Structure formats: C-alpha cells, structure tokens
Amino acid sequence: MTEALLDELQPSCGVILVKDPYLAFAKVQRYFHPQLQSGAIRHDSASIDASAVLADDVDIGACCVIEAGVEIASGTRLAAGCLIGKGVKIGHDCLLHAGVKVQNDCLLHDRVILQAGVVIGSDGFGYAWSGKEHLKIPQVGRVVLHNDVEVGANTCIDRGALGDTVIQQGVKLDNLIQIGHNVEVGALTVMASQVGISGSVNVGKGCQIGGQVGTAGHLSIGDGCQLAARTGVVSDLEAGGTYGGFPAMPHRTWLKTSALIMRLPEIWKKIRIIK
C-alpha cells in the first residue's frame, strides 16, 4: 500500500509500504509464478526440416511444423500447432503459444512472447487497380520483433511490401490488433485491444494507445502520445500530446465537444424557437 492510506488502517494491521503497489504486485507475482523453462521436449508428431538449426534445449510441441532454414536459439518454447516458415530466425527464451504462425524470413529477437493464434508476416494489404481488377503486389519484406515484445492472442502483423515492418524493444500489443505493412512501432509503446494501424505509419516511443483506435496510412504519431479509446487518427500527431475523438484532437477539446454533442437536441429546440 501507499503512505497516503496509512491513516485509514487499524493500529493492529500489518503494513507493507511501497511507492507503487501495482508494480510491487507484479514483481511478487513474477517471483511466485516464474515462466517455465525449456527442457528439450520434442513431440513425435512435430515436423522439423533437416536443414533447421535448433538449440539442444528448445521445446517443440505436438503438430508443430518447422520449415527449411529455420534457426531457433536456446531456451525457446513452441506450444502445439505452431508453424515456423522458411528462413525464420527466433532468438533466446521466446515463448510461442498454441497455433502461432510465423511466416517466411521473419525475425524474432530475444524473450518475445506470442500468444495463441498470432500471425506474424502475413501479406500486407497491397493491391493496384488496373481498371478491371485489383492486382496483388507481392509483399517481399519481413516482420522484425525486437527484444521483450509481447503480442496478444489473434493479433496480426503484416510483412513489409519492400522493407520491414518493425516492432521495437519492449512493445506490448493486446489481443485482436492489426498492424499493417511497413509500420514501425517505437520502443515501450503499448496498445489495447482492437487497434488498427494502417500501412507505413510510424508510431513513436512510449505511446499509450487505447482500444479500437484506428489510423489512416502514411502518418506519424510522436513519441509519448496518449490516445483515448476509439480515437481516429487522420493526420500527424505531435509528440507528448493526449488526444481523443474523430478526427483526433486534443483530449480536452474532445471532452468539451462530447459534452456539447449531448446538448445538441436541447440547443436545436432553442434555435427552432428563435427562427
């Protein structure tokens, strides 16, 4: 608990005084529930190409498929049903939950966690209109996930069209997020569920992005931005700002606008009387 709550306790109560109770709770939980370690468990039903290079202690669950040229470093664990495409490289102490798909040539650095159903390296949404049909543009880049990235269940991160889609160190993505091709997400940014980031967007470092935020493509969100849930980003946002609404505006402006919207029926009645 924090010092501010001391006066509310009975004298007989035991006290553990900390500056940040939530952070202290996280540390205690991690102590009593550490992540399981790999143990060189290879299920008989797994299919591992002869050219794949796996550290001796890597765990491979039932029905996993490891394709040609894959490299997986020490301490990594793959749960049942994972597909690791050709040429993928996975670093130390990663954890891939059931049904994860990592497509060809993608790169995962160390301590990456992918929750169940994540798809890394699916084709970006790239088509050119010929006048008769939408011609698919081959997506030949990669997805690169840096150290300590965690990706929530059923989130999809598209590979780049030419260059890479890059998720920097320590980024945490919730469930059901869509990251488009050639996006870069800066270090330590967090995103809540159902966020959609369109192609070629640059998200800065340390941003906090609420649920169901959506962006147009080819724009920049500055370092340290905070975006309220359901914000619609249609142009560049300056670093350090707090935004809300559609189109995105300073959060205080959005609160005033929202309050005014609630009063519109009343205001309209007054306007009709005046007319």
Image (cartoon, grey):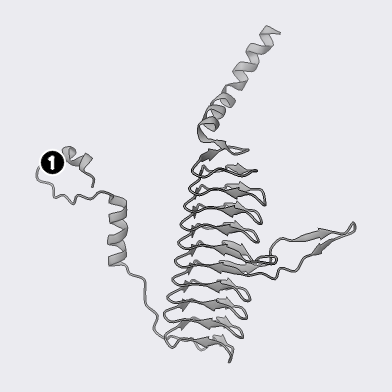
Quarter of the figure with residue 117: bottom right
Instruction: Say which residue appears at 28% left-offset and 49% top-offset.
Output: 20
In which quadrant is the C terminus drawn?
Answer: top right
- Location of residue 115 in the rendering, given as x and y in whole percent from the top left corner: 49, 66
Task: Kindly identify which residue carries mark 1.
Answer: 10
Q: Is residue 189 left or right of residue 182?
A: left
Which residue is at the far left?
Answer: 12
Residue 166 picture location, percent across and down: 57, 63
Q: Position of residue 164 (x, y in %)?
A: 62, 66
Q: Looking at this rendering, what residue extends furthest in the bottom direction?
A: 50
Circle 1 residues within 10 Å: few <14, some 14–19, many ≥20: few
Tell me what residue is drawn at x 63 percent, y 70 percent: 142
Q: Residue 38, how many percent across, how many down?
A: 40, 80
Q: Looking at the image, can residue 71 be seen? A: yes
Q: Is residue 129 left or right of residue 110?
A: right
Amino acid type indicated by mark 1: Gln
Q: For the point 60% across and 85% down, which residue is it?
A: 69
Which sits in the foreground, 104 or 33? 104
Residue 99 can be seen in this image: no
Q: Residue at image x 28%, y 50%?
A: 21
Helix, strand or loop status at disc 1: loop
Count numbered badges in the picture: 1
